[in-house]
Image: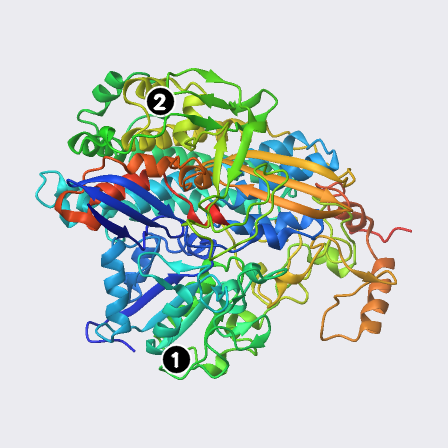
Amino acid sequence: MTRITVGPFNRVEGDLEVRLDIESGRVARAEVTAPLYRGFEQILEGRPPLDALVIAPRICGICSVSQSIAAASALRQAMGVVPAPNGVLATNIAHAAENAADHLTHFYIFFMPDFAREAYAAHPWHGAAAERFTATKGSAAREALPARARLLEIMGLIAGKWPHSLAFQPGGTTRAIELGERIRLNAIAGSFRGFLERVVFADTLENVLALSTPSELDRWRDGRAGDFAHFLRLADALALADLGKGPGLLMSFGAYHDADGANFRAGLRASDGMISTLPSDLITEDVSHAWMRETSRDPAASRSVPDADKADAYSWCKAPRLAGEPVEVGAIARQAVDGEPLITALLASDNSNVRNRVIARLIETARLALSIEGWIKALRLSEPFCETSGEMTDGRFVGLVEAARGSLGHWLAVGGGRIERYQIIAPTSWNFSPRDSDGVAGPLEQSLVGTEVGDAGARAVSIQHVVRSFDPCMVCTAH
Amino acid sequence: MVGAEGMTRMLWLQGASCGGCTMSILESGASGWFDELRQSGIDLVWHPSVSEETGEEAAELLEAIRDGRERLDLLVLEGSVARGPNLSGRFNMLAGTNRSIYHWLLDLAPLADYVVAVGSCAAYGGIPAAGINPTDAVGLQFEGSDVGGALGAGFRSKRGLPVINVAGCAPHPGWIMESLLALTTGDLTADGLDAVGRPAFIANHLAHHGCSRNEFYEFKASAEAMSERGCLMEHLGCRATQAVGDCNQRSWNGGGSCTKGGYACIACTSPGFESAQNYLQTAKLAGIPVGLPTDMPKAWFVALAALSKSATPRRVRVNATADHVVVPPSRSGDKRSS
């Protein structure tokens, strides 16, 4: 048996290190390290509660809006505020724009460039993949980056700027949209749809979302232009559906609430496909393998106290568990829990894997584009965007939202009008968790086991595919 | 600084960072940032978010630069330098290298023609340095507004410049690109930096300049609650009259800015902005905001404010506390109301 170390691990948000024990050319055991700790929870302690709206989004530059709305959600409970309906819609539009922009960034900038690597030069498909997706040089980024920037112009209208905005308040959003601005939002949504239908899917969003079985998807892909079909052909050529199997449990906190409830429902999907309500009170964090002192397993009662010299620890990330189990989060979990037909059928056929994670992100992007169009129409321009009443109260509050990469929770304790404790469990804290006190590995650690590395060792592209298929956000992970 | 192959070689590293400065710069360029770099003669040697090289390939590249086998023209850092615990740098290791970002920077910075701190974290410590500063986070050459930081007050890059601080959280993509390009053309020199290392072409302006709420400011017609249209200075914490940056002379994300977005400037280009509290409330002494424009006698400001308040047109006064225009401009001109 040999041990290999992979890092720095780039084309993710932040950095990570993976250590792999290799037996007969395959991964027998994996350990993942979050190598950065900044101490946001310690920084927040003792501050006025509303300061969280300034500090918390700066945990993450790529999912800053998600961090903002998790903080705003916890603060909303603390203040007893009911947000203005327009503010909820405007928040949804901006949040969905960030979610979709993140999916595009992941697909075009982080994930697809691995197919352009020299290691694949002998494959017949390599020339086309390299022309399109080579990191910083491929033709795709020339279209995807301007499309991303155009989509993020939604932030200029609703949030002032991105990343790091103070527009997302407990009572709604801080800029009332006028008619001309609604027309501009519509135009941006139209540009986004145009990019998706021309470049990503080479078909209408409605046709893409009508696909509901693996065989329909295969037929749709054949002979089709567009980068999604390109990916599907690469995924089949490399059998990516057999790579990076998830641990089984998939979780979503639910997202995009409006007058009709959550657009993406909350819940838990078991490996047999059964979907149940989310037992969010059974969320714990285990620090047995984290460079952290033991305080409490309950995020509502725990603190973060670093201990860089702790024995048996190998990550700054704590190990979140739901009823004692590791769970996978992300677009695939969101779409599965929401019962999206194609993702449900793909999971029934071959579970969570590298291919299905990427498909779920792009299907979700199509759904978000349609939702954005609907929310823009639903704004009532003569009504308020921000409810400003409400007094801060002491107590314990929780904000549970979905970031692009999965479930994000902020646990806030206010005492004497100040933040007593603040605990954050981010999506990649779940996906890239270290082992717990029972020795149970986190989702990525489980997914890597069995991956073939052959003679390439630490340079094996298969490892890259598995890690990046989760779209890790390492700056959020340990925060 | 243009080398044999004609391109400026830029290495971008991330320290104790949120990655937001990279998210900002990825908005730059009509056909994307990568095209813009090429068209500007910059060879992006490695960037953690976008380059192909990973693991050993990336580590070998960094070692080659450290050992002088590869030239380094521009070294960019995004994120603070987490020196702790006990100057070990272990709060922020560069994965796979068994070495902290702090120590990598100590090796690499002296080899670069120019060292650029992108964002207020790399410049001054920023948000990770807030509160108890759990990780002993500092900027490359400043710790808040005190010169020093990770590299020390005396540090000069190979071309004799201190660290160039492109402050902001996150900075406008234009600030980043224009600063980098002004270095490659030789137009940004030590004389072109302000006292805390910020390029003067950005820092010679105030965030207030060009604010769309200017008429409300003139008449001290103030918003009292979030989402109202009036000036944000008197009640809602706005520091744009004291914070440097041409924020409101540019368009953020196609047309926005903080004050256009309906919330206060929190002076994110200033060293120590992370140490403030109650950002969205104006601190006052005897009813007068503590943070007034720095280069104006306070008594004059108060006198002028009282005068302009008494001269405020009804349109301006009413709209200041509404979230949409209630009283439009009238063709006959607004009369001062009693």
Quickly name the residue at label 1. B157
Q: Chain of mark 2?
A: A
Residue B128 image position (x, y, % from top left) = 55, 59
Secondary structure under the numbered disc 1 in the rendered image: loop
Q: Measuring 34% from the left and 72% from the top, which residue is drawn there? A: B108
Q: Amino acid at mark 1?
A: Ser
Foreground residue, A303 or B19? A303
Residue B171 x %, y %: 50, 60
Crowd around label 2: few <14 · some 14–19 · many ≥20 (10 Å): many
Residue kind at label 2, given as amino acid type: Ile
In the rendered structure, the answer to whether residue A461 lies left or right of residue A322 reads left
Q: What's the distance in space between the residues labelled 2 and 1, CA to CA?
A: 53 Å
Is B150 drawn above or below residue A243 in the view shown? below
Q: Which residue is depicted at the point 52% across and 53% down? A: B252
Residue A171 can be seen in this image: no
Q: Which mark is residue A343?
A: 2
Q: Is residue A85 visible?
A: yes
Question: Which structural element holds mark 2?
Answer: helix
Count residues near mark 1 (Cα–Cα under 10 Å), then give few for <14, some for 14-19, many for 20+.
some
Instruction: Indicate the quadrant where residue A422 lies.
Output: top right
Q: Quadrant of residue B159?
A: bottom left
Residue A219, image x and y in percent? Answer: 21, 19
Q: Is residue B153 above or below residue B23?
A: below
Single out the residue that lies furthest toward the right.
B338
- Confirm whether circles 2 and 1 share one chain: no
